[in-house]
């Protein structure tokens, strides 16, 4: 008998579907982002979400839905997360460090994908809070700029510091030696606050309805022939934006039936 066959392999305690944390950035006391290794087999469409989490105290995985914030060409995966003080997952997840492991189920799904939209000229990404995560992926995907002449990213938060993750992402994108050229002139970023003084203010719904965003960016109002939209925010936000989009004549689409706009919940519940 070959001796090596009976040599005991040291038991390394690893989580099922474990991925290793490579970077953690805390943006505010309520928001952080992190990057993890990417399973080689994981293919996803920019805008999709996966289930991620940690091992719970009961020895069972504690998983939650998370939009993948990185584009599909990235070697790693990025996530942008809320910190819910008593949240079963994020009360723990917010303490992860580089080298730690998280669980990632490699089954991406979701409706915020190009396949669910009919071809058009302009695409509007409409997000509040952590709802910018799927657009952090889509804004960095060359397909977005192949498919549309103009990409408008509207992101609204209560305060200026809550916009910082998105602001830096857009700035880095524009200055990127590879993607910058593709994005140049096509990506229009329109961040607003609602509860702190900022150069642009107001809810996305209001800025679309009163025409302020069109005036500020020098754009024609939305038109179902040319405009497509993707929406990601709280339930209340999604519901109100959908009514505004329908008012412009856009209809909700799905993977199985592409139309003019698609919607995904940024989280379940009323928010914190
Ligand atoms: P939970 O018990 O899950 O939530 C407790 C309460 O906190 C909720 O009832 C709600 O009121 C509030 N809350 C939860 N998530 C948020 C949030 N993101 N923003 C504001 N309030 C919130 N969360 C992210 O941080 N980033 C993502 O990319 C993300 N993608 C998601 C995609 C989908 C399709 C869905 C359904 C949810 C997504 N979420 C995302 C929410 C996420 O699944 C968890 O709810 C969140 O991580 C909190 O987990 P928890 O166990 O700590 O608390
Ligand atoms: P506001 O400050 O006027 O409530 P939250 O932090 O509560 O998740 O909200 C994130 C951002 O989304 C805030 O700027 C908030 O504006 C805005 N918002 C919340 N609900 C709606 C809604 N129903 N329609 C439009 N914007 C909303």
Image (tube, grey):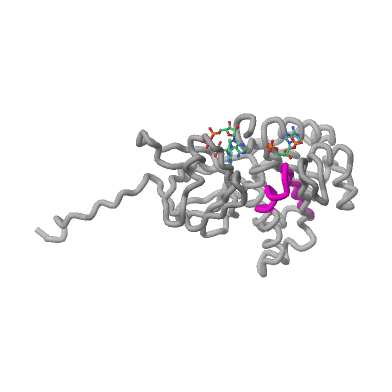
State the image quarter where residue 243 is shown: top right
Q: Is 44 placed above or below 58 here? A: below
**From what the image shows, is residue 40 above or below residue 212?**
below
Quarter placement of the C terminus = top right
Q: Residue furthest left?
A: 1
Location of residue 168 in the rendering, given as x and y in whole percent from the top left corner: 68, 58
Q: Magenta stretch: residue 174 in it?
A: no
Residue occupying image coordinates x 45% and y 53%: 39
Residue 222 lies left or right of residue 38; in this view the side is right
Tell how many labels: 0
* Residue at x 53% of width, y 52% of height: 34
Quadrant position of residue 249:
top right
Left or right: residue 231 versus residue 88 is right
Depicted 168 relative to depicted 215: above or below = below
The answer to if 158 sits in the magenta stretch is: yes
Q: Quadrant of residue 159?
A: top right
Counting from the top left corner in percent of width and height, residue 71 is at 60, 54
The image quadrant in which ligand 2 is located: top right
Residue 236 in the image: x percent, y percent? Answer: 71, 30
Q: Is residue 48 toward the left or the right of residue 195 in the image?
A: left
- Magenta-colored span: 150-166
Task: Judge left or right: residue 220 versus residue 52.
Answer: right
Q: Which part of the image, by quadrant, shows the N terminus?
A: bottom left
In the image, what residue occupies the spot 87% across and 47% down?
214
Residue furthest bottom as drawn: 177
Residue 104 coordinates in the image, percent (x, y): 46, 45
């Amino acid at each position: 008998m070959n001796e090596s066959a009976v040599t005991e392999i040291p038991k390394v305690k690893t989580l099922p579907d474990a991925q290793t944390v490579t970077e953690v950035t805390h943006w505010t006391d309520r928001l952080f982002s992190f990057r993890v290794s990417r399973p080689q087999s994981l293919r996803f469409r920019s805008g999709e979400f996966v289930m991620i989490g940690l091992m719970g105290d009961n020895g069972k995985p504690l998983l939650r839905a998370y939009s993948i914030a990185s584009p599909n060409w990235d070697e790693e995966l990025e996530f942008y997360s809320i910190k819910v003080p008593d949240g079963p997952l994020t009360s723990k997840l917010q303490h992860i460090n580089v080298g730690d492991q998280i669980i990632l189920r490699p089954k991406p799904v979701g409706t915020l994908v190009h396949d669910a939209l009919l071809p058009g000229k302009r695409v509007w990404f409409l997000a509040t809070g952590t709802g910018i995560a799927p657009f952090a992926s889509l804004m960095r995907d060359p397909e977005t700029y192949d498919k549309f002449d103009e990409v408008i990213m509207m992101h609204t938060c209560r305060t200026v510091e809550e916009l910082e993750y998105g602001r830096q992402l857009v700035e880095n994108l524009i200055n990127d030696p590879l993607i910058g050229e593709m994005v140049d002139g096509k990506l229009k970023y329109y961040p607003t606050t609602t509860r702190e003084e900022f150069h642009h203010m107001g809810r996305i719904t209001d800025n679309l309805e009163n025409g302020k965003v069109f005036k500020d960016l020098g754009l024609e109002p939305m038109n179902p022939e040319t405009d497509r939209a993707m929406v990601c925010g709280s339930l209340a936000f999604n519901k109100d934006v959908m009514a505004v989009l329908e008012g412009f004549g856009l209809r909700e689409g799905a993977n199985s039936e592409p139309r003019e706009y698609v919607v995904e919940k940024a989280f379940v519940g009323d928010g914190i």
